[in-house]
Amino acid sequence: MKIDLDGPQLKEAVAAAVLQSLDEQKKGELITDAIKFLLTPEKGQYGRETVAPITEAFRQACHTLAFERCKELLKGEAELWAKLDAVIREAVDNALKGEQREKLVSNIQSAVVASFAPNY
């Protein structure tokens, strides 16, 4: 007999098995440790500020909601899209000029170097 479990099914099965094997005290400790993890700041990728996983999840949810709302508001607004495109193009052009260019190059360089560093 062959049983195939995909990633989510396997994770669910392991989680259920672990929870069933724990007594009430150990379950409480596991939940406490999970909450501590969610509230403990960690260093983000590419040297971003230190944030807790729950904070990052909240930021991501807000970003996603705002993005979806903007998409709804801008549907069929060709003139507004053209204005936004012009502003974005100007911002990119300015970032590639003079002192701003050097800062942009330095930031990109730092991100590339950080991506090569071991993640520990």
Image: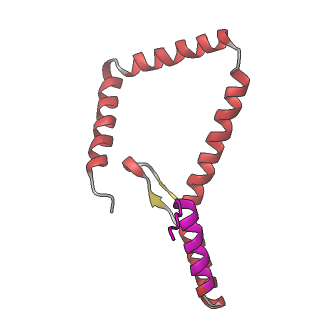
List the single residue furthest toward the front.
1
Q: Is residue 8 above or below residue 79?
A: below
Q: Could one spot residue 39 in this view of the protein?
A: no
> Number of labelled discs?
0
Which residue is located at x 58 percent, y 79 percent?
17
Q: Quadrant of residue 78?
A: top right
Which residue is located at x 57 percent, y 80 percent?
18
x, y percentage for residue 42?
A: 46, 61
Q: Nearer the viewer, residue 33 or 47?
A: 33
Q: Quadrant of residue 72?
A: top right
Which residue is located at x 50 percent, y 67 percent?
2
Q: Quadrant of residue 12?
A: bottom right
Quadrant the C terminus occupies = bottom left
Q: Is residue 54 above or below residue 77?
A: below
81 to the left or right of 111: right
Look at the image and say whether residue 5 sits in the magenta stretch: yes
Q: Specify the segment rendered in magenta.
A: 1-20
x, y percentage for residue 76?
A: 71, 15
58 to the left or right of 108: right
Q: Nearer the viewer, residue 115 or 19?
A: 19
Q: Nearer the viewer, residue 96 or 114?
A: 114
Q: Is residue 2 above or below residue 99?
A: below
Q: Nearer the viewer, residue 12 or 35?
A: 12
Query: Coloring scheme of the render?
Result: secondary structure
| Secondary structure mostly taken by the magenta-highlighted segment of the chain | helix
Look at the image and say whether residue 119 sits in the magenta stretch: no
Q: Could one spot residue 113 in this view of the protein?
A: yes
